[in-house]
Amino acid sequence: MSRPVVLSGIGHLGPHGPGLEELVRGLEAGSLPTDEVDTRAGFHAPGTARRAAFVPAGACDRWVPAREARRMSPPSRMAVAAARMALEDAELEPDRVAGSDTAVVLGTAFGSTTFTSRLLDQANEEGPLGMSPFLFMETVANAHAGQVGLALEARGPNYTISQGEASALLAVARAAELVASGRARRALAGAVDEISPVLHAALGRLGALSPPRPDGSGERPRPLQQDRDGFVLAEGATVLLLERAEDAERRGGRARARLRAWIRGNDPSGRPGRHGTDARGLSAGLRAGLERADVALSSLERFVSCASGSVAGDLLEAGILRDLLGDGGSFDVVAPKECVGEFAGGFLAAAALGAAPGGAAPAPESTLVELARGRPRPPGRSLWSALSSGGAAAWLVADTDARP
Amino acid sequence: MTVPRENGSGDGVVVTGLGVVAPPGRGLAAFWDGLASGRTSIGEVSLFDTSRHRTRVGGEVRPIDAREPRGGRGGPPSRTDSFALAAARLAIGHAGLPRTALARAGVFLGSSTGGMFEGERVYAALTDAGRRERARVGRLRDQPLGCAAESVARAWGVRGPVETVCSACAASTMALEAALSSLRLGECEVAIAGGADALCELTYGGFNSLRAVSDAPCRPFRADRSGLSLGEGAGILVLETEASARAGGRTPLAELAGAGSSCDAHHMTAPDPGGTGAALALRAALNDAGVRAEDVDLVSAHGTGTPHNEAAEFAALESVFGARAREIAVTATKGATGHLLGACGAVEAVAVVAALGAGAIPPTSGSGAVDDACPVDLVEGAARPIARDAVAVSLNMAFGGANSAVVLRGRPEPGGERP
């Protein structure tokens, strides 16, 4: 039996700092704060990006005391902080989630790359006998979900999903399924990723990042814009509390959104690390999924696009959007990654809040698809999208509570 | 709230194809022969220089299979991807699945090393100023953990769900759980499910840093066991609804009857000594399968060969099975294969289905008395007969406290292919 699932708490820390207010302010300002990446190791190729969107120092401190933080990598700290923030937002005491009926499902595209590179450095410089067991433990991709489970004594299913840019939404979909099917009463679901010099340099060398421009206007995400040239790498963590609607109601909790459907698919036309081109195939899969879920395309009011400024990825997304808009869709399109960057799940928080980048909209002729700004109408039914550069795709339909 | 429609027919989910690339052999027959012989396939690692590591042995796949086509332009696949593609090809062929059925399939894999074997070489080049500009950075496209699943999906034109679970040693069992869920919900009718991992120095050195690795092939459940042996490979199961199998004329080899997962919430690397978390996963799987503890005939144990693991695992078995924990037949294939990390659950599930089809439980490699602290009825020395319609559970326990278990039920009907 499928049980209605609601989203009743959001925890987020990202480039705008910790908390939802900071995120909303950043979105309304239409900005993404970035800083220089440490390039002293010499990994970066000439002409490639030098800036990324970091979580401010100390952002986790209020939620992860030093004695706990010492046992964690940066992504684990961020994940635990975001999980505790989600419970605060839901007004749910941590002892209420301890137990075997709470699942943890996190997505991560890269895991702890700072610890991985430190461990490899140890192996290269001191030999394998110099490798630190603590570093090793935190390089395992499910360490962050494990730390959340440990911190909250959540003994239900503990999943970590890694599927590139689709990791976050696939994690939420998996979590929703666990709650809907009764395998868990509630789930802490979301994503975490961190920036390291080698990761940033590698993505730059692979042509994925928005590079500098002579006029200083480079290294910016330009989702769905004609002159996009790559995404901006971000770090952070977002965790959503999903629970049975009946449980949220019983405890007087607020449902920020009701999750109506989740749909997963794949575009087999891509290559490793490069988006494919079969927008029509993906669109067909999405429409079939909506039909199975009894969600009419015409009922969608907002499409929260995963567009990030990726040259190929945004083109694929635009193809899907044009297909849907030409087939009876009449929704606004927003692209929050303009203000939260790519990876780390900031997109999830923005989507869950119904928030969108503010400021002046780009001229329609300069975009692949017309973009809405701010909150031109109260968010109602929205569809959130995710397209991995390896082909995997995920979409989620949420009926967002109009209250802030 | 709606999700993809439920499988209203009440059909079960069955296994119709098996594919495996593992140290005992490539392909089901070679793999089974290796397991059934009781021999270990763990030996000196030749993939990289182990002279500076604490230990020398591991379960290496050799020789590496010829590079499988990845279904698109690009360089060679990573070692992990190669294993996944080869095992998938074997499983799909075993099932006799036409390509047309795969367009609507889903791919659910577990992995914990991804392309790290190649990635650590690129990293070494990037950190060397003299080699930096010749570093094959393009190989890093194969590095992410999700690449193997996407490679498989790409190779067979899959348009259904694609998901990679990377919950360490429980990853591929959880991938089987994810596939089971999707099939039951009707999100797809066929799933390519399993796991793949390759040896790499990061993991080899890392486990050694924990002092968890034996300097000889691991000997699960033995009193003088001294640690695990790392291994590599891939196991893939073709899962489908019974209706899909019937419509395609494919004979089920076994039923994937249930699955369950949990988290110890005890420690990041050591299992809860009371086995509480693992017991939760076992009970959840049995409950999901509608199977009573007293009806289980076989346990495929996680059995790594570390003192902590087997003690905790026995505590879990006692919690669930009571006194029967000392009587149910137990096999632990890591003695033959090594610990395949993210792929171990899938390879062990392949072994269980193969065992049910053969009507024989493979012996656990290694010698020595079973530890009094974990007094299981260990199948050793020679294969032991088992009814073909027996019920088996396969359990895995991972870093981060993740635990996962599946319940597999054999089929009594003749014609189910023997390995």
Image (cartoon, grey):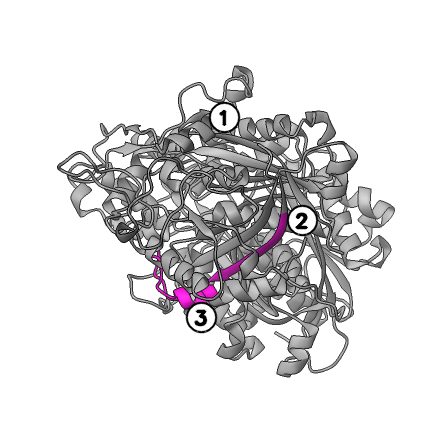
Instruction: Give the magenta range.
Output: A259-283
Query: Where residue A308 sits in the image (x, y, percent)?
Result: 36, 46
Query: Label 1 sits on what residue type?
Result: Glu
Q: Please determine if labels 2 and 3 lie on a single subunit.
A: no
Classify 10 Å Cα crowding around label 3: few (below 14), some (14-19), many (20 and above): many
| Disc 1 to disc 2, C-alpha distance | 30 Å
Task: Please check the rendered image and state whether residue A263 is part of the magenta-colored stretch, yes or no.
Answer: yes
| Disc 2 to disc 3, C-alpha distance | 28 Å
The C terminus of chain B is located in which quarter? bottom right
Q: Are marks 2 and 3 in contact (CB under 8 Å)?
A: no
Label for residue A21? 1
Query: Label 3 sits on what residue type?
Result: Gly
Q: Chain of mark 2?
A: A
- Judging depth in this view, the residue of A223 and B396 nearest the camera is A223
- Judging depth in this view, the residue of B229 and B239 nearest the camera is B239
Q: Can residue A361 be seen by looking at this rendering?
A: yes
Q: Nearer the viewer, mark 3 or mark 1?
A: 1
- Judging depth in this view, the residue of B242 and A238 nearest the camera is A238
Q: Chain of mark 1?
A: A
A37 shown above or below B377: above
Task: Please check the rendered image and state whether residue A32 is part of the magenta-colored stretch, yes or no.
Answer: no
- Circle 2 SS class: helix
Q: Chain of mark 3?
A: B
Classify 10 Å Cα crowding around label 2: few (below 14), some (14-19), many (20 and above): many
At 55% from the left and 46% from the top, the residue drawn is A171
User: What residue does disc 3 label?
Assistant: B157
Q: Please determine if labels 3 and 1 lie on a single subunit.
A: no
User: What residue does disc 2 label?
Assistant: A178
Q: Nearer the viewer, mark 1 or mark 2?
A: 1
Label for residue A328? none
